[in-house]
Image (spheres, rainbow, N blue to C red):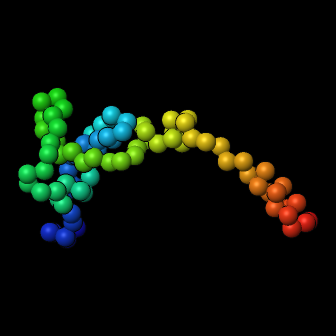
């Protein structure tokens, strides 16, 4: 591998604000965060934290709170309006 061309890769916590969940993983976003970026402590170790709007813990599709679209009614309405 070539030296000094790859982004910094390290541990980071992604926090879902609406779902109140956290995920500790590794990411290249660590290299783009400022030195004074907020951190969160997990097991006594501080990790940089990135807040996300939606994750699988709060997305309506994954939580089962999504609404079902009535596609059959739309097709029938189209056929009535424009014929077969």
> Total label count?
0
On the image, the x and y values in percent for residue 16 come to 33, 41
Give the residue displayed 13% in from the left and 38% down from the top. 46
* Left or right placement of residue 21 versus residue 30 in this view: right
Give the residue displayed 84% in from the left and 55% down from the top. 76
On the image, the x and y values in percent for residue 32 come to 18, 60
* Left or right placement of residue 39 versus residue 81 in this view: left
Q: Is residue 23 visible?
A: no
* Left or right placement of residue 51 versus residue 40 in this view: right
Q: Quadrant of residue 17?
A: top left
On the image, the x and y values in percent for residue 52 come to 32, 48
**Which of 9/78 is in front?**
78
- When the figure is inspected, residue 33 is found, relative to residue 61, above or below; the finding is below
**Which of 33/72 is in front?**
72
Give the residue displayed 36% in from the left and 48% down from the top. 53
On the image, the x and y values in percent for residue 6 come to 21, 66
Q: Which residue, as the protein is rendered here, is positioned at the far right?
A: 84
Q: Quadrant of the C terminus?
A: bottom right
Q: Quadrant of the N terminus?
A: bottom left
- When the figure is inspected, residue 19 is found, relative to residue 74, above or below; the finding is above
Q: Quadrant of residue 22?
A: top left
């Amino acid at each position: 591998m070539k030296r000094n061309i790859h982004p910094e890769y390290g541990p980071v916590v992604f926090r879902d604000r609406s779902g109140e969940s956290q995920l500790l993983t590794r990411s290249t976003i660590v290299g783009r965060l400022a030195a004074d970026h907020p951190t969160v402590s997990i097991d006594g170790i501080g990790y940089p934290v990135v807040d996300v709007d939606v994750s699988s813990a709060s997305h309506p599709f994954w939580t089962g709170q999504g609404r079902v679209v009535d596609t059959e009614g739309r097709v029938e309405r189209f056929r009535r309006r424009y014929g077969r």
